Structure formats: C-alpha cells, structure tokens
C-alpha cells in the first residue's frame, strides 16, 4: 500500500496538476461509470489503470493500491491520484464502493426490497414507479458513453458484418426486440436462441465477420457469458448491453453500453435498457439512410402481399 505521503501528492507522473474531482457528478455512480466520465481528463498513466481495472472488473480494484499499480504498470501514488480523480476521498473509499457493487451484482428479487410497503395505497405505488422510472432513464442517458455508442452504431451499420443478437433468460426479450428492428433495416441479421445440442453450428460459424450484440444483466448467466467469450475468441466483435455493475462479458467486449435496472418492484426493470435499444435503432436508421428506408419499403410490400394472400 502506498504511504501517506503518496496519498497527499498533488502531481501526476508528467508533473501536471490533476483537475479537481467532480464529487457531485460521481455521487451514486458506479466506479465504472466514474471511469467513463473521467476518461477525457486522464493522463496516459491513469488510462493504463483504467484499462487494467476494466479488464478485471471489479476484482482488480479490490487489490491493494500497489497490487493494482503492478497490474497497470504504474506507481502506487499514481493509483491514489487516479481514485481521487474519480471523486473518491481515498483508496479505502474507492474499495468500499467496489465492495458495495459486488453485493449489488448478486442481488436477487428475494434480497431487493420493494420501494413501498404492502399496505401502501395504489396511488403511492404509481407515484413511486414514476419517480424510479424517470430516475433510471435519466441516469442511463447521463452516463451513456458516447464514443462506445458511436462505435456500436458503426459496427451494426457495416455491410460487411453479420449481426447476431442473444441474451439470457429475461434479456433475450431485448435481443429479439433489437433483431426484429435490425432485420428491417439491413440484411445479414439473426436472433440466436441457444438450445442444448443445437448450438454447435452457430458456434462453429462465428468469425471476424460477425458482430454479436449480447444482453446480460445481474445474476449473469454463465451460458451467455461463455458464448460471448467464444465469439470473442473466434474474432467476432462483441457489443454488450448490461447494468452499471457490468457483466463478466465486459472484460472482453469491444463495446459496453450500461443501463440502470432499478424498479419499484423487487424485479429488475428492462425499461432503461429498452430505451437504450430504441436509441440504437434510431441511430442505425439515421446512419443507413435511404438504403434502410428502401429495405423497409420492400419489407412492407412483402408483408402486404402475404396478408392479401390469406
């Protein structure tokens, strides 16, 4: 662990003064969200720490400052300055936040309390639902990493790429919703639904031409994570939709798009992730332009013909 003198150092390794941490901006945000917000202000050494932390999140940050420094190839004082840049009072505060995230990652409907009691009137439930939904949407878009979102749009619009969407037990709904839109906007898309004994062909065909859009939220599914990892190892690009605590897929994903999942009930909500998917669809449609409109027009004619033949 770095000494007290290191904790009070006021200079980066290149001799410049770090900008004051925006503590209010980071309040309530996960460490990963804080890293994304601070990305443009990080020194080269601090960016090394950010990469090391993201590559093994959140475990890397639960090591000592010297341990994280060793992983990133920087000095321990630089790690202390890095966490201050993120808005933490010290390394202990930084680690406490990560420990709370670990607990949140393993939350379930049995451990998440509803926002109102059983005896509360329906009007209070409706009001609470409105407040929670509004907050999750606002926080999701406020923390949206624009560079990664733009990268996701570029990958999905690339005509040389094939797009495969898949998710978990509940998040497969989001994968299907995205696929239904993408197949109207561009060719070469599919929804993958894993089934025992029927997955081999899909896994074998994955290669550098593919973009896998993966949906994985807390209580992350091992089969979803492993399929995404296999796609990455085969050279496919991986675009991940996840929660603020980050699916293990984030370790190797090319793009990570987090969304809040808080709900008035004990069950996580897909409202904010769905809004993020809608935004992606709008961006893809805008990027593809006339080609997308022509395909939509042709699809409409095909649908009209099928209905007329019934």
Image (tube, rainbow, N blue to C red):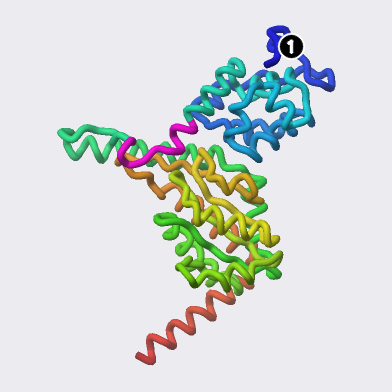
Look at mark 1 in the image and give the residue it sits on.
9
Q: Which is nearer the eye, 116 or 81?
A: 81
Q: Which is nearer the eye, 161 or 70?
A: 70
Q: In this view, does 106 lie above or below 181?
A: above
Q: Residue furthest front?
A: 197
Answer with the quarter of the image where residue 154 lies. Answer: bottom right
Q: Residue furthest top?
A: 5
Answer with the quarter of the image where residue 134 lies. Answer: top left
Q: Identify the residue at image location x=16%, y=36%.
A: 121
42 falls in the magenta region: no
- Judge the density around disc 1: few (<14), some (14-19), many (≥20) Cα neighbours within 10 Å: few
Q: Quadrant of the C terminus?
A: bottom left
Q: Give the range drawn in magenta.
A: 101-111
- Asked whether, in this view, residue 41 is left or right of residue 109, the answer is right
Q: Identify the residue at image location x=70%, y=14%.
A: 2
Q: Position of residue 129 (x, y in %)?
A: 31, 40
Q: Residue furthest bottom?
A: 309
Q: Identify the residue at image location x=74%, y=13%.
A: 10
- Asked whether, in this view, residue 272 is left or right of residue 155, the answer is left
Q: Please indicate, yes or no, whether residue 154 appears anywhere in the rendered image.
A: no
Q: Position of residue 284 (x, y in %)?
A: 60, 61
Q: Position of residue 8 (x, y in %)?
A: 70, 9
Q: Which is nearer the eye, 151 or 239?
A: 239
102 falls in the magenta region: yes
Q: In this view, does 83 lie above or below 228?
A: above
Q: State the SS at label 1.
A: loop
Q: Quadrant of the N terminus?
A: top right
Q: In this view, does 139 lie above or below 156?
A: above
Q: Which is nearer the eye, 258 or 209?
A: 209
Q: Where is residue 304 in the image (x, y as percent from the top left)?
A: 43, 84
Q: Please indicate, yes or no, whether residue 284 appears anywhere in the rendered image.
A: yes
């Amino acid at each position: 662990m770095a000494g007290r003198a290191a904790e009070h150092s006021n200079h980066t390794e290149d001799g410049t003064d770090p900008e004051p941490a925006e503590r209010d901006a980071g309040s309530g945000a996960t460490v990963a969200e804080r890293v994304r917000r601070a990305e443009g202000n990080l020194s080269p050494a601090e960016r090394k720490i950010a990469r090391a932390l993201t590559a093994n999140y959140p475990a890397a940050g639960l090591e000592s400052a010297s341990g994280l420094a060793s992983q990133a190839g920087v000095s321990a004082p630089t790690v202390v300055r890095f966490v201050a840049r993120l808005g933490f009072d010290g390394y202990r505060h930084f680690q406490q936040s990560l420990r709370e995230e670990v607990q949140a990652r393993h939350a379930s409907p049995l451990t998440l309390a509803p926002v109102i009691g059983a005896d509360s009137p329906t009007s209070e439930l409706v009001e609470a639902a409105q407040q929670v939904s509004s907050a999750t949407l606002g926080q999701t878009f406020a923390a949206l990493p624009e560079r990664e979102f733009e990268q996701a749009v570029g990958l999905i619009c690339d005509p040389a790429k094939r797009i495969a969407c898949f998710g978990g037990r509940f998040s497969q709904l989001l994968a299907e919703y995205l696929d239904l839109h993408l197949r109207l906007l561009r060719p070469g898309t599919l929804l993958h639904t894993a089934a025992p004994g029927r997955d081999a062909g899909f896994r074998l065909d994955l290669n550098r031409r593919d973009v896998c859009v993966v949906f994985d939220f807390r209580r992350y599914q091992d089969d979803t994570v492993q399929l995404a990892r296999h796609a990455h190892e085969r050279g496919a690009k991986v675009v991940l939709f996840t929660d603020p605590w980050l699916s293990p897929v984030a370790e190797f994903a090319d793009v990570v798009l987090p969304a809040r999942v808080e709900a008035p009930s004990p069950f996580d909500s897909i409202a904010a992730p769905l809004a993020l998917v809608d935004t992606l669809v709008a961006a893809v449609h805008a990027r593809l332009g006339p080609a997308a409109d022509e395909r939509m027009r042709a699809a409409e004619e095909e649908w009209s013909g099928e209905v007329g033949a019934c």
